[in-house]
Amino acid sequence: MDSLRSAPALDPERFLDARYGLSRRQQGQFRPVSAGSGSAIDVVAPSLPGVALEPAATGGTPSFAVRALNRLTFGQRSSDLSLFKALGSSDSERLANWVDWQLAWDEIDDSALQAKLDTAGYVTLDKSRSALWTEHLRSSDYNTRMRPGWEVQRAKFVRATFSERQLLEVMTDFWHDHFNVYGSSYDYAPMFPRYDRIMRKYALGNFKQMLESVATSNAMLYYLDNVYNSRSGPNENWARELLELHTLGSANYYGFMNPFEVPPDADDPSFPAGYTDIDVYETASAFTGWTVKNGHWQYPAEDDGNFVYRAAWHDTGPKFVLGMLLNPEQPAMADGRQIISRLAQHPATARSICRKLIRRLVGGAAPGSLVTSAARVFRANVSSSTQLAKVVRHIVLSTHFRNTWSESVRRPFESVVAAMRAISPGFTIRLDHARSNDLMWRMGFTGNVPFAWPAPDGCPDEKEAWLGSNSLAMSWKLLNWMTEAADGSTALLPIVQISRSKVAKWTAPALVDYWSKRLLGFTLTSSRRSALIQFMAQNGSSSYVIEDTDAWSGNDLKRHYNHQRLKSMVSLIMMSVDFIRR
C-alpha cells in the first residue's frame, strides 16, 4: 500500500483495482474528470411517495397569512399578521414582499432580542474559539465546561420566541438538523456556541462555504471523529456521513460496488449517479490531517482549540472520488476542498437538500417538479453568497407552498415556542433560573430538547415521528404546565392579565373566540368551539359574565376557580390538532 501511495500511477481504474481488489467487469460507465472541472446544470428529480395525511380539522380554516407564517416562523402573532396583510393587495404579493424582507435579515433590527439575551446573563454565545477552549473545554469544573452548550440550548428558545428575523431562525434550525451534532454532550458542549454561529452565518448563504466551515469546526471534527483521522489511523465516520447525510443522500448509495460500474447521473453525465463504499474510503483519506490544536502528544505546545492541518498526518497519495481524480502530493487541504467543491456541485446534492428544504418549509412529500426547479436554482447559484436564500425564495413562492397546508405538524419545541410567541412570555428563559430549569426538565420528556438528538441524522421532519402517544402526551403536559408556571408573581404565560385587557366581558364564547383567534389565527366554528364554551361556562349560560375571581365554589361551578378554568381552556386549545398542524 505504501509503495502504491508513493507511486505516480494516475490511471484511476488501475490504482483502485490494486488498492481494493476490484474486478474490472465494466468500464466507462461515466467519464472521470479532473478536480476542478465544471459540468452542465440541468436536473430532473424523482418524486417521493406520498404519506397519509392527517384528518382535516373540523374547525375553521386559517387565512393564507396564518398558513404561511406558521411554516415560515416559529408561530404567528397578531402583530405578524397585521404586518403581513399590509404588504400588498394579494396573497402572492404579500408573501413575496414578506419573504424578501426576511431574506434581507441583516437589515432587520433585532436589538430587542439582543437586549434580552444580554440582561438574561448569556455570556458565552459570542466567545471566540480559543476562549471557549481555554475557559470552558479545559475547565475541570463540570458546570463551567457545559455552560456554553446549555446557553445555546436556552438561547434557542429566546431567539425563536423574540427574534424579528424569524426566517433566519427557522433556517438555522433546519441546518442544525442537517449537520446535526449532539450539543448536550460533555465532549461537544464547550465549543457549541461557535458551531451555532456557523449555522447562523450560512443559513441563507452559500452551501459550499458552510460545508467547509462545518468540516473545520471543533464540534463536527470531534463528533464524527475526524479529529483523529490520520494516514496511520484512518477514520471514515465523517466521510460516510458527509456523503450519506450532508450531501448526496442515502438514496444514492451503491454499496461496495466498483465505482466504474456506477451509472452516470441522468442530469449531468460528468458525475456518477451516487457513491460507493470506495468513495467513502477515498474521502476519508482526503480529510486525513484535518484536526484541532488540542495538545496532542506530538504537538503538546499547541492547545488553543483552533483548526489545524497536519501535513504529516495526511495521506498524500492519489485518490479517486465520485469520478474525480485527485493527484498525489497536492497542496495543503486541497484534497478535502476539492471533494467539498465536487459535492457542492453534484446534482444529487442539490436534489437531496432541496427535497429536505421543501419538506421543512412546505410540509409532506416533495413533488418532483418542485425538487427539479429548486435544484436548478441551487446549482445555478453554487458560487453565490446568497445561494440558499435564492433556493428558499423559489420554494416559498411556489404554487405548491400556496396550495399546501396541514401536511406536517409542529415538533414539541415548536409548540412550546408558538405558545410563547402568541401569549408574550412574562420572563426570559435562561440559565441559573428555577422556572427555566423546570421547563428544560419537562422538555426532556417530549424527546425534543434542542441539540440533544444523539444520532447524526438530526431530528426528523416526518410528522409520524411526533404523533406518537408519548410525544403528544408529554407535550400536552408541558403546555398545560406553562399556563400555570410563574416566577414569583410573574406568570410565564400571562393569560389572566391579557384576558383582562383584551376581553371586555368574560362570557364563555367571548373568551373562547379571543383565545382561539390569538393562538390559532382563526375562530373555531365547529363542535370544538361548542365543547370549549361548555367547559368555560360550566353550569352558566353562554351569556353569563364570568367573574374575575379564582376562589373555590364547588356548589356553583360557573364561579369555581375561574382563573384556573380559563388557563385550562387555553391549554385545551394548545392541545388541539389545530394548534400543531402546519
Image (tube, rainbow, N blue to C red):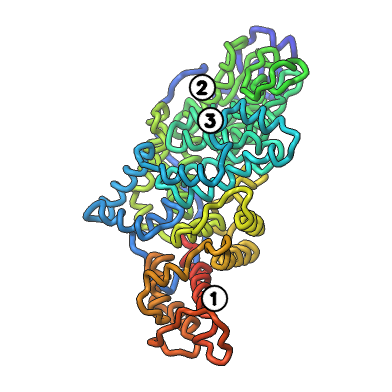
Q: Is residue 125 left or right of residue 16?
A: left
Foreground disc of the pair 2, 1:
1
Please indicate whether residue 72 sits to the left or right of residue 83 in the image.
right
The disc labelled 2 sits on which kind of residue?
A: Arg
CB-based contact (under 8 Å), mark 3 and mark 2: no
**How many residues crowd around disc 3 within 10 Å: few (fewer than 14), some, or many (20 or more)?**
many
Determine if residue 379 is in view: yes
Whole-number angstrom distance, CA of label 3 to CA of label 2 = 26 Å
Q: Residue at x 54, y 21 (%)?
A: 337
Q: Residue at x 54, y 28 (%)?
A: 213
Q: Dot 2 corresponds to which residue? A: 31
Give the position of the N terminus as an image quadrant. Answer: top right
Q: Is label 2 in contact with label 1 (beta carbons under 8 Å)? A: no
Considering every residue shown, the one lying at the far right of the view is 297
Measured as percent of width and height from the top left, residue 483 is found at 54, 67
**Badge 1 or badge 3: first in the primary sequence:** 3
Task: Single out the residue that lies furthest toward the left.
Answer: 89
Inspect the image, locate mark 3, and give the three-letter code of the amino acid beneath it.
Leu
> Which image quadrant for residue 233?
top right
Q: CA distance from mark 2 to mark 1?
A: 71 Å
How far is the residue under mark 1 from the one under mark 3?
A: 50 Å
**Residue highlighted by disc 1:** 564
Identify the residue under disc 3. 211
- Farthest residue to the bottom: give it: 555
User: In the rendered image of this protein, does residue 375 appear above or below residue 82?
Assistant: above
Q: Earlier in the sequence, mark 2 or mark 1?
A: 2
- Residue neighbourhood size for the residue with mark 1, other residues' Cα within 10 Å, grouped as few (<14), some (14–19), many (≥20): some
